[in-house]
Image (tube, rainbow, N blue to C red):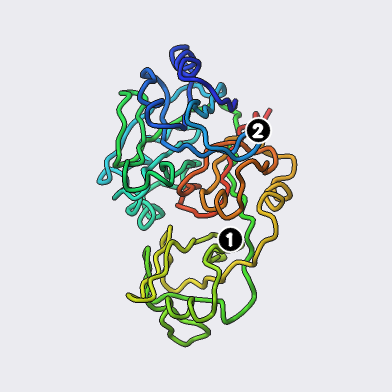
C-alpha cells in the first residue's frame, strides 16, 4: 500500500495506468479525475508527514498494488443493506458516505444489521467540507467507474486480493472510560439525540445535567463492547429544548461513561500508535483534529484524511481507523 499527496495530473496518470486507488481531496480536484478503479470523497483536512494541515491543491491518494482486482460502485440509501453482495471472495471493501446525508443516518443506525456486513473488512469514512463551508456546499462521494459525484448514498470499492494476503483492520482510540458514577449514562432510546438519560438509576434531563455539572463536551461518551471501546461524540447541547445531539447514535440500554481528560492529543496518538502507520491506510476524526489542535502537529507515522466520522464495520467518532495488508507467506 502506498500513500501519496499528488497533483491532479499525477493522480490522473496513476488512474490511467490502472492503479486501484482511494482518493481524498477538494471537490474541484476530484471532479477533474478520469474514470477508473477508484472512489473518492471530499475533505480538505489531512494528517501529513509534517503534521495536520488544510490542503486544497493536492489529493491524498492511497494506492493498492496488492489488489488483484477492484469494482467501484455507488449505492443509494435504499440499496445500502445489500452492500455485502458486492464483496469479493477475498479482500476488503472501502466505503465513503457524505456527512449529514440520509445514508449517513441510515448506516449509523442500521448498518450493523445489514446481512453479511461483517463477512470481510469494511473500512472508510464520512466525507466533509471545510468547516467554514458547512451549510454552503455539500460533502460528496465519487464513483470512479463513472466519475460522478454524489451528495447521497455511498461510494464502495470492492478490492480483491490474491491468496495468502492478510487484511488487518483496527482502531486506535486514545480515550478510556472514566470511573465516576455521576458521569456514567444509559439512554432509554437510541438515536442521534437524547433528552433523557439515567445516572446511577435515576432519570435526568440530560442537557440540564451537562450544564449543571460543567461536563466537557469535547470528551466523548465511551461504551465498552466486550473490551472494544467505542466513542459517541456530543455535537450540541440545547438547554432550552433539552436536546443533546450526537455525531453517532447512542444505543438504548448500553452504559456510556464520559472519557477521561487527555493531556496532549498528539502525544497520545503517537504513544498509542508506536512505530505503526507507515504503509497503512488511516483516517482520523475532525474532532480530534480540532480539539487536539493537531494542525502542524505530527501524530506518529499515520497519515491520511481527516474525516467527519470513521467506519470500521460500524460508524465511529473521535477514533483513528487503520487498515494494513500483509503477505501471510
Q: Which element is circle 2 on?
A: loop
Q: Position of residue 79 (x, y in %)?
A: 27, 43
Q: Position of residue 137 (x, y in %)?
A: 32, 41
Looking at the image, is 319 positioned above or below residue 7?
below
Q: Which element is circle 1 on?
A: strand
Q: How crowded is mark 2: few (under 14 residues within 10 Å), some or many (20 or more)?
A: some
Image quadrant containing the C terminus: top right
| Lower sequence index among marks 1 and 2 | 2
**Towards the viewer: 227 or 138:** 138
Residue at 34% of width from left, 40% of height from top? 154
Looking at the image, is 109 positioned above or below residue 194?
above
Residue at 59% of width from left, 46% of height from top? 170
Q: In the picture, residue 189 is in which quadrant?
A: bottom left
Q: Position of residue 118 (x, y in %)?
A: 46, 47
Q: In the picture, residue 175 is in which quadrant?
A: bottom right
Which mark is drawn over residue 229? 1
Image quadrant containing the N terminus: top right
Residue labelled with disc 2: 49
Amino acid at each position: 500500500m502506498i500513500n501519496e499527496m499528488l497533483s491532479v495530473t499525477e493522480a490522473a496518470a496513476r488512474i490511467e495506468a490502472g492503479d486501484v486507488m482511494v482518493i481524498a481531496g477538494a471537490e474541484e480536484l476530484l471532479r477533474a479525475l478520469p474514470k477508473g478503479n477508484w472512489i473518492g470523497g471530499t475533505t480538505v483536512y489531512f494528517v501529513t508527514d509534517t503534521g495536520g494541515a488544510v490542503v486544497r491543491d493536492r489529493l491524498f491518494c492511497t494506492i493498492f498494488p496488492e489488489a488483484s482486482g477492484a469494482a467501484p460502485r455507488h449505492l443509494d440509501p435504499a440499496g445500502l443493506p445489500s452492500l455485502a453482495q458486492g464483496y469479493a471472495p477475498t479482500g476488503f471493501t472501502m466505503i465513503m458516505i457524505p456527512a449529514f446525508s440520509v445514508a449517513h443516518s441510515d448506516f449509523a443506525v442500521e448498518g450493523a444489521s445489514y446481512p453479511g456486513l461483517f463477512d470481510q473488512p469494511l473500512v472508510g469514512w464520512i466525507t466533509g467540507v471545510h468547516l467554514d463551508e458547512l451549510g454552503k456546499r455539500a460533502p460528496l462521494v465519487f464513483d470512479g467507474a463513472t466519475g460522478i459525484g454524489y451528495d447521497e448514498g455511498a461510494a464502495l470499492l470492492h478490492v480483491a486480493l490474491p491468496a495468502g494476503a492478510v487484511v488487518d483492520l483496527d482502531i486506535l482510540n486514545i480515550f478510556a472510560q472514566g470511573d465516576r458514577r455521576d458521569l456514567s449514562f444509559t439512554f432509554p432510546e437510541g438515536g442521534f439525540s437524547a433528552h433523557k438519560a439515567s445516572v446511577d438509576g435515576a432519570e435526568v434531563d440530560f442537557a440540564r445535567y451537562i450544564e449543571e455539572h460543567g461536563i466537557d463536551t469535547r470528551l466523548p461518551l465511551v461504551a465498552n463492547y466486550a473490551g472494544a471501546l467505542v466513542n459517541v461524540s456530543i455535537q450540541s447541547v440545547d438547554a432550552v429544548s433539552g436536546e443533546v445531539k450526537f455525531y453517532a447514535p447512542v444505543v438504548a440500554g448500553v452504559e456510556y461513561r464520559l472519557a477521561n481528560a487527555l493531556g496532549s492529543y498528539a502525544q497520545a496518538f503517537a504513544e498509542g500508535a508506536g512505530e505503526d502507520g507507515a504503509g497503512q491506510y488511516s483516517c482520523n476524526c475532525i474532532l480530534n483534529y480540532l480539539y487536539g489542535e493537531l494542525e502542524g502537529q505530527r501524530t506518529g507515522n499515520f497519515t491520511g484524511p481527516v474525516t467527519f466520522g470513521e467506519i470500521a464495520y460500524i460508524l465511529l467518532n473521535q477514533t483513528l481507523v487503520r487498515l494494513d495488508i500483509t503477505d501471510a507467506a
